[in-house]
Image (tube, rainbow, N blue to C red):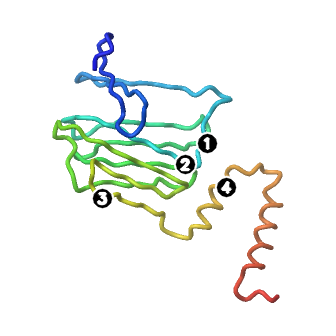
C-alpha cells in the first residue's frame, strides 16, 4: 500500500505494527538513529527481524552500535551472498551464519535474529532456526562481561563474594 509519500507501507503479519520499505540505489544509503541518552534500551537481549531483497553479494544490512566507549555492536550482513550476524557484548566477536541459502538472488527474504547474552539464534525465511552458544566456560564469559560493568571500587568486593560462592558450591566443599 502506498502512503502517498513514495514509500511502501505494509502491515506486519505477526503484529499490528506498520513497516516501511526503503529502496536504495547503487550508491547505497545510511539510516542513522541515535537513542536519547536517558532512554537507551537494555543490552541484555536483542530481537531483530528484517525483510529485504538484494542482488549484492556483500552488504551491511543493519548495524547497531552501543554508546561510545562500550564497544558493543551487532551487525547483520551479506557476505559471499549469504546472511550472517556478528556481535560483541563485551568479550569477543561472536558470529552466526546461514550458509544454506543465497540471499543475493533478488528475491524477498526475511531474517530473524535473537540474542540473549552470548547466545544467539538466526533464521532465514522458513529454514530451521540456527543456534549459537559460545564455546568455553559460560560462567567465565558471563564474569568477563559483568566485570566490565562493575565499578572499579566494587571489583574487589565482588571478587571476594564470587570466591566465597565458589567455595560453597564446590563439590569438595564441606557442609
Q: Would you call the spot at circle 3 few (<14 residues within 10 Å), some (14-19), or many (20 or more)?
A: few
Q: Are marks 3 and 1 in contact (CB under 8 Å)?
A: no
| 4 and 2 marks in contact (CB < 8 Å) | no
Q: Tell me the element at label 3.
A: loop
Of badges 4 and 3, the one in the foreground is: 3
> Furthest residue to the top?
4
* Residue 60 percent across, percent down from the top left: 34, 37
Q: CA distance from mark 4 to mark 3?
A: 32 Å
Residue wearing tag 4: 146
Q: Are marks 1 and 2 in contact (CB under 8 Å)?
A: yes
Q: Which residue is mark 3?
A: 128
Query: Could you tell me which residue is drawn at 20 percent across and 48 percent down?
Result: 102
Q: Position of residue 32 (x, y in %)?
A: 46, 25
Relative to 31, say whether 174 is above or below. below
Judging by the rendered image, the residue that carries numbered circle 1 is 42
Tell us which disc is closer to us: 1 or 4: 1
Q: Nearer the viewer, residue 8 or 120?
A: 8
Q: Of the residues under marks 4 and 3, which one precedes in the sequence? A: 3
SS class of the residue under badge 4? helix
Image quarter hosting the N terminus: top left
The x and y percentages for residue 3 are 33, 14
Residue at (83%, 61%) from the top-left corner? 157
Q: Earlier in the sequence, mark 1 or mark 4?
A: 1
Query: Quadrant of residue 164 in the image?
Result: bottom right
Q: Quadrant of the C terminus?
A: bottom right
Disc 3 to disc 1, C-alpha distance? 28 Å
Mark positioned earlier in the residue sequence (4 or 2): 2
Badge 2 marks a residue whose secondary structure is: strand
Q: Residue at x 24, y 21 (%)?
A: 25
User: Which quarter of the picture shows residue 127?
Assistant: bottom left
Which residue position holds label 2? 45
Amino acid at each position: 500500500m502506498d502512503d502517498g509519500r513514495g514509500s511502501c507501507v505494509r502491515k506486519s503479519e505477526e503484529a499490528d505494527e506498520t513497516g516501511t520499505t526503503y529502496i536504495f540505489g547503487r550508491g547505497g544509503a545510511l539510516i542513522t538513529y541515535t537513542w536519547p541518552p536517558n532512554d537507551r534500551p537494555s543490552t541484555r537481549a536483542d530481537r531483530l527481524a528484517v525483510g529485504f531483497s538484494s542482488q549484492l553479494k556483500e552488504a551491511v544490512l543493519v548495524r547497531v552500535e552501543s554508546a561510545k566507549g562500550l564497544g558493543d555492536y551487532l551487525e547483520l550482513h551479506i557476505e559471499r551472498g549469504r546472511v550472517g550476524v556478528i556481535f560483541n557484548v563485551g568479550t569477543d566477536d561472536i558470529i552466526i551464519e546461514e550458509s544454506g541459502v543465497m540471499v543475493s538472488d533478488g528475491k524477498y527474504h526475511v531474517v530473524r535474529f535473537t540474542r540473549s547474552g552470548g547466545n544467539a539464534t538466526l533464521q532465514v525465511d522458513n529454514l530451521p532456526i540456527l543456534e549459537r552458544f559460545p564455546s568455553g566456560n559460560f560462567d567465565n564469559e558471563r564474569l568477563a562481561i559483568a566485570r566490565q560493568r562493575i565499578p572499579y571500587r566494587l571489583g574487589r568486593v565482588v571478587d571476594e563474594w564470587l570466591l566465597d560462592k565458589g567455595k560453597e558450591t564446590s563439590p569438595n566443599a564441606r557442609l
